[in-house]
Image (spheres, rainbow, N blue to C red):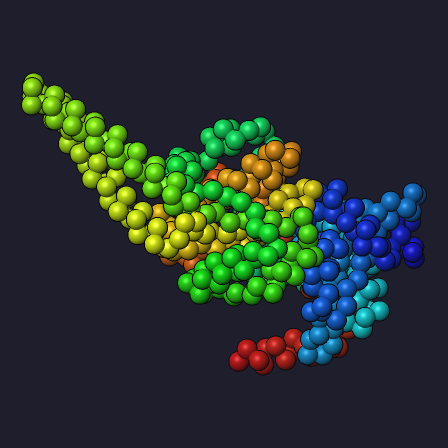
């Protein structure tokens, strides 16, 4: 390694060293791992691992994976949710920037863009500030030549600037986890559990089920569908760290439960009818009216259940992909079948993931990932996603955003001009 400053040495690191850093770093995440490198390697021109070591003992204190893709005027580097570096530490950040610059020049890149995991401001679930803004981190980046893309809202095309997170560090069991949600979400989870919905992990040979649900959801909501091949490559790259989960309706169990509820309500109504006939009271009449309505609702749900039975014995209703990192579990992709929306399968999958992948394993951070960052517009495209995630009572992290470091200033200026022309 070359000496960057008195304190630090910079240069290439191994993929294993990056994985070790990602596992222990406060900003560690699945995108800054050798698994992610394996996933993207067939689709990019080059992947490089660079880092910063303490000169005193050689320990790695910052690092990242840079993926180089072909642009109009040469290669462009991307560092997704990285670099793993404390952007408030000016000396360390300078060394990390130098390491990135050396790599980019070696690859004759035009520029390198990064989306650090550094939190600009923590916010409440409703988007209100819950702490000071980290302007120093942005100023430090700018002083080193990084150009900030600004404080945008909306879903990022590459990395979201706004993420929704739940702290599970003080939750010890499923009952406490359920109590931590708002009342509506508690009801949804309980409702799904009582309607014959069960969550299980899909095997590699079943990823077509996940892809099918994801495709339906993409078509319905108008977002990009990555394709079954992508999900298979993801599983191959991440192995046991990637969990493709499905929530399925066991129709026979649901029907049996509804029949039992109908019979119990029928018996209650008949008993109230007999009581009212023998000794009429306003209270009994009110109870009879309420239980009669409950009975009619149960009969209606039982009739609907018979319709669902025509679809099959076990019906995939929702599916999600969760990715593990020692620091957190990320909820990355999901989809649901609109016809089975009344079964609240999506809520049950979230509960399952937080309980079994986090609480039971001692992982204190659950990352719901992207939201739009718009909290005051009921017509915003991300409103439904926001409200679903808010139901689990987490908080918001507003990240510092996108930065670009020009490497070849002439080509970068030409590229900027070309992009302006293309936008006209």
Q: How many marks?
A: 0
**Along the horizontal axis of the image, is 318 left or right of 226?**
left
The image shows residue 19 at horizontal and vertical percentages of 77, 49
Q: With respect to residue 269, does 23 lie above or below?
A: below
The x and y percentages for residue 111 are 73, 69
Q: Nearer the viewer, residue 143 or 315?
A: 315
Give the residue drawn at x 86%, y 49%: 53
Q: Is residue 280 visible?
A: yes
Q: Which one is in front, 86 or 325?
A: 325
Q: Residue at position x 74%, y 47% from top?
A: 22
With 318 as the anchor, is 357 left or right in this view? Answer: right
Please state which of residues 347 and 412 is positioned toward the viewer in this rendering. 347
Residue 372 visible (yes or no): no
Vertical relation: 404 (above or below) 365: below
Q: Is residue 23 left or right of residue 171?
A: right
Q: Residue at x 70, y 47 (%)?
A: 28
The residue shown at (39%, 40%) is: 253
Q: Quadrant of residue 96?
A: bottom right
> How far across and down, in percent of the image, does residue 152 sit?
54, 59
Image coordinates for residue 246, horizontal then vertical, percent: 51, 49
Say whether residue 271 is left or right of residue 278.
right
Work out whether residue 403 or residue 386 is closer to the camera in this orientation and state it: 386
**Up/down of 416 relative to 131, above or below:** below
Looking at the rendered image, the quarter that the N terminus falls into is bottom right
């Amino acid at each position: 390694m070359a000496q960057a400053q008195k304190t630090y040495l910079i240069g290439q690191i191994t993929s294993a060293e990056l994985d070790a850093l990602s596992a222990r770093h406060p900003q560690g995440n699945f995108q800054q791992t050798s698994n992610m490198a394996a996933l993207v390697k067939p689709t990019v021109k080059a992947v490089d691992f660079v880092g910063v070591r303490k000169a005193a003992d050689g320990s790695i204190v910052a690092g990242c994976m840079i993926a180089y893709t072909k642009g109009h005027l040469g290669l462009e580097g991307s560092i997704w949710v990285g670099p793993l570096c404390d952007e408030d530490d000016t000396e360390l950040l300078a060394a990390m920037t130098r390491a990135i610059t050396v790599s980019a020049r070696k690859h004759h890149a035009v520029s390198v863009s990064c989306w650090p995991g550094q939190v600009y401001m923590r916010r409440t679930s409703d988007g209100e500030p819950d702490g000071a803004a980290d302007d120093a981190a942005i100023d430090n980046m700018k002083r080193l030549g990084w150009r900030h893309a600004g404080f945008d809202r909306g879903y990022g095309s590459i990395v979201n600037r706004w993420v929704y997170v739940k702290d599970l560090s003080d939750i010890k069991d499923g009952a406490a986890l359920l109590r931590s949600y708002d009342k509506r979400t508690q009801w949804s989870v309980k409702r799904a559990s009582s309607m014959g919905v069960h969550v299980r992990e899909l095997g590699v040979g079943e990823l077509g089920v996940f892809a099918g649900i994801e495709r339906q959801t993409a078509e319905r909501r108008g977002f990009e569908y990555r394709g079954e091949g992508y999900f298979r490559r993801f599983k191959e790259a991440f192995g046991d760290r990637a969990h493709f989960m499905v929530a399925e309706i066991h129709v026979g169990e649901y029907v049996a439960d509804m029949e039992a509820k109908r019979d119990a309500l029928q018996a209650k109504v008949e008993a109230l009818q007999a009581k009212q006939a023998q000794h009429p009271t306003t209270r009994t009449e009110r109870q009879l009216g309420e239980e009669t309505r409950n009975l009619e609702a149960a009969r209606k749900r039982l009739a609907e259940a018979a319709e669902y039975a025509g679809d099959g014995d076990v019906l995939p209703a929702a599916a999600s992909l969760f990715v593990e990192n020692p620091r957190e579990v990320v909820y990355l992709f999901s989809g649901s079948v609109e016809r089975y929306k009344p079964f609240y399968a999506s809520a049950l999958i979230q509960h399952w993931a937080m309980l079994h992948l986090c609480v039971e394993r001692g992982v204190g951070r659950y990352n719901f990932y992207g939201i739009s960052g718009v909290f005051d517009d009921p017509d915003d495209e991300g409103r439904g996603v926001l409200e679903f995630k808010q139901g689990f009572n987490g908080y918001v992290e507003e990240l510092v955003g996108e930065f670009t470091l020009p490497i070849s200033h002439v080509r970068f200026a030409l590229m900027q001009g070309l992009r302006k022309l293309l936008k006209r």
